[in-house]
Image (spheres, rainbow, N blue to C red):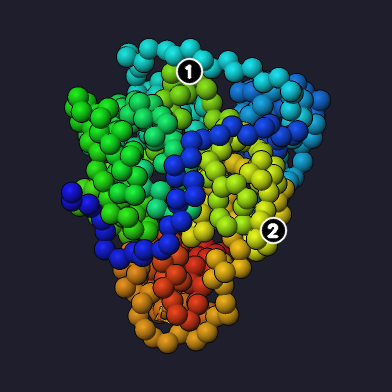
Amino acid sequence: MELKTFTGGIHPDYRKEATAYKATEEIALPEEVVIQMRQHVGAPNEPTVSAGDRVEAGTTIGSTEAFVSAPVHASVSGEVTEISEQISFSGALVNSVTIKVDPDQPDKWTGKKNLEGITPEQIREIAKESGLVGLGGAAFPTHIKLSPPADKPIDIVIINGCECEPFLTCDHRVMLENTEDLIEGLKLMMKAVGAGKGIIGIEANKMDVVEAVESKTASESGVEVMPLEVKYPQGNEKMLIDALTGRRVPPGKLPSEVGVLVQNSGTAVALYKAASTGRPVIDRIITVSGSGIREPKNVRVRIGTRIEHVIEQCGGFVNNPEKVIMGGPMTGFAQKSLSAPTVKGTSGIVVLTGKETGESEERECVGCGKCVDACPMFLMPNSIVKYIKRNQYEKADKYGVKDCFECGCCSYVCPARIHHVGYVRIAKAELAAKK
Ligand code: SF4
Ligand code: SF4
């Protein structure tokens, strides 16, 4: 079988076996949830409720008129106890609505609507009203992605089923446990943008998903499943488009430039659920894994559940954990506090022990060039870092620092343990401030 891929990249130890074949579990509800007003790329929401209000799961509790935004909903029924700034996964303080959870949580989204006559406008409206954002972690509002400019027609929609980060298996389970919804979600996206072709790209370490999707798309015209080589960062939009279509997105441009829309597999499933049942984004599946967690598993959590509650529901810590990461180990955020709540873009909680963090002191570059070979954007991470260390940000800019999408491949292969992404983030902030 031919496996598609891109040039560059790395083969980290994937460590997915601890959770890949475990069905998703429901965890006990926490006593309270903390729903943050900034969970997406774009303008933050303003709370539309006050302390003392009673809310039902699915009630809109935060919104804004800003164009690039997505509303947030109560993920549980209960009483609003506080509106205050709370720590987020990034360490920043974010305005949040705290809800004390009722013991009884009726599920009102059970019946399914017939979507045969649904229009592109209705699909975009449903995506917006349900607060849908890219659930792979990017958290870009979905209704905006489903509204490409008129001069950039989309002919292919790609569902990103790669999940190339080590440890994470939530997309694997979402696709396997909701295969029909995945395909229906893709068809809604194709209809919204008027694309005639849909591709579901899945890394070859999930052949059970490839087979499940193939068996259900055999009679679908215009929908194809394409297995991909297992390689990091295969799930990056630009790498995925290159591998599946041979089209190259120019530096600084979006996939619409080459007629492609990419959406995460979980987003497609959530869109279909929103359209067919009215269910907004109030929960999601996340992977809890790493050798520092007692019972690694995939769990369904309500948005706003604090990390400490999720860890407790997975048996707590073992083996002296050293680092707790929200997201995957390559692009996730190390946590200073376990009280940060999960947000729509939370794909995992990874708990690493000393050996696994692989952290050691940074040394001088030895000029081996391994980072250049690994960079999927064909950048020169060694030169970029050299200029950033000298505060020569314009030179780093000329070497393409703004095209770096912070995948971490360069740091992974670097024998001098240079943390390129940290330098890149400094340079991007400096260049943005100067602009
Ligand atoms: S320079 Fe950026 S895009 Fe290239 S490997 Fe490093 S982190 Fe990835
Ligand atoms: S991999 Fe590290 S040591 Fe080798 S050239 Fe790149 S920055 Fe220098």
Q: Position of residue 276 (x, y in %)?
A: 43, 18
The residue that label 2 is drawn on is: 336
Q: Residues within 10 Å of mark 2 (few under 14, many from 20)?
A: some
Number of numbered discs on residues: 2
Q: Residue at x 54, y 71 (%)?
A: 358
Residue 397 in sight: no
Q: Residue at x 74, y 45 (%)?
A: 85
In terms of sequence position, does the residue under pointer 2 or pointer 1 come before the other? 1
| Residue 333, placed above or below residue 86 | below
- Relative depth, front residue between 23 and 32: 23
Q: Is residue 75 left or right of residue 356?
A: right
Q: Amino acid at mark 2?
A: Lys
Q: Is residue 20 left or right of residue 43?
A: left
Q: Amino acid at mark 1?
A: Thr
Q: Which mark is residue 277?
A: 1
Secondary structure at numbered mark 2 = loop
Q: Position of residue 165 (x, y in %)?
A: 44, 54
